[in-house]
Amino acid sequence: MCSETVMEANDVSKVYLLYGRPEDWLKQMLVPKIKRLLAPVLGRLLPAMLRDEPRYREFWALKDVTVKLKPRETLGIIGQNGSGKSTLLQIICGTLTPSVGAARSEGRVAALLELGAGFNSDFTGRENVYLNAAIYGLSTAEIDERIQAIIDFAEIGEHIDQPVKTYSSGMFVRLAFSVIANIDADILVIDEALAVGDAYFQQKCMRFLRKFQEHGSIFFVSHDIGAMMSFCDRVVWLHHGRVRAEGKPKEVCEEYLAYIYQKHSGVDPEATTALKAESAANESTAEIATAAAPDIDVAQISAPENGRGFGDRAAEIVGCNLYGEKGPVLHTISGGELARLVINFRANTAIRSVIAGFIVKDRLGQFIFGDNTFENAASKPVDLEMGAHGTACFRFTMPTLAPGTYSIVLSVASGTLTEHVQHHWLHEAIIFNSHADINTGVMLKVPVSSEITTTCRQR
């Protein structure tokens, strides 16, 4: 293994043989052997009978997959159900043998792959702690030293001495995660199991994982795109058992989301996508007009800063800007400003029931707030003929955002929020900076009144 990696899978493939009927498996096992035994006779009398067709079909759960995990790196794995994520993790952990290729790791690997993995349902929670920790290489004396810390982390109380077959799925996860959190692992492999835990325990686990990132490496599988972008250093997208994309979390996740929207739109993935961009944390007003809003000079609306996006381009965003209350373009904010976001778009074909929207994202690509014009236009849908221009104008109070760089995603679609066609979704169309004085560690500050009252105790 390369010294720059602590875990790797090299050209790994995994194939399963699928049989149409149960008896086909028995025939596949016995018939070729019988024919080989009778070959001296059949070869002379009935040579055609020696030919034998497979009674199965091959399903490649993984095909030529190579992934590498570096020291103190968190690698995210995304993909739809059935894409091979869990199969890859099982091969990496050594619980599944690849059909082709090899996987290697250095140091102690702790895995949380699925509910109940490594547990004996008839044992108590305490007994399963000793069993599970022993599998990871801890001696009885080492487990004795850590048993109380494991029990305290799990927070399942008296259930620790009850058979785990009586546990809920959340209790399973609590105990399993508590074990891997207390065995001094070098590498953690986390599958979707954390998704079944309650919100309190999920936050507790994430705090542990962020602390673990300071000295260890993590393989992390989740459908939570926000967690992928904020938690991982690198992301691999698995698609039908192959690596479709690999790189920076923000870029790979945006590509993955574009594919998901395309797939669920029911239209050619190369042509159009579907998206639901609903209102979030800020109140705003919006309108669409077939000409520019009266207080905006369309000539001053700048072209989008980049062309990264997707959609069928039946309508296309051709200009946009973020304005302050008195007209100048906003490049920096401190919070509380009255802002106007103007989107200018052109219809390349006739479209009905136009929806324009925006989403403000942080530097990691996490959605902060946004809105769209659907609700305001629902009573009077806006239609555009081919070649016509439209302008959407959003007015809102800019929230107080933590210092940093933010971007605005713009979109133009047609239809409804639940059934629509995405014409143009544009990443990072506008970039701005926040210079707000927030030193409390939060991302978003809202107006809050507070007070402290005291009472004097009579002597």
Image: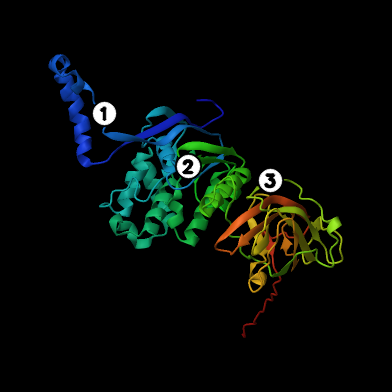
Residue at the far bottom in the pictured view: 458
| CB within 8 Å, label 2 to label 3 | no
Mark 2 nearby-residue class (10 Å; few <14, some 14–19, many ≥20)? many
The residue that label 2 is drawn on is 188
Can residue 163 be seen by looking at this rendering? Answer: no
Picture coordinates of residue 391, whole percent (x, y): 76, 62
Badge number at residue 7: none
Q: CA distance from mark 2 to mark 3?
A: 34 Å
Residue at 46 percent across and 47 percent down: it is: 181
Tell how many labels.
3
Badge number at residue 53: 1
Q: CA distance from mark 1 to mark 3?
A: 50 Å
Q: Secondary structure at mark 1?
A: loop
Q: Amino acid at mark 1?
A: Glu
Mark 1 nearby-residue class (10 Å; few <14, some 14–19, many ≥20)? few
Q: Nearer the viewer, residue 55 or 110?
A: 55
Going from N to C along the chain, the mark reached first, 2 or 3, is 2
Left or right: 450 with respect to 72?
right
The residue that label 3 is drawn on is 308
Q: Amino acid at mark 3?
A: Arg
Picture coordinates of residue 85, whole percent (x, y): 45, 42
Going from N to C along the chain, the mark reached first, 2 or 1, is 1
Query: Height in image: 67 above or below 380?
Result: above
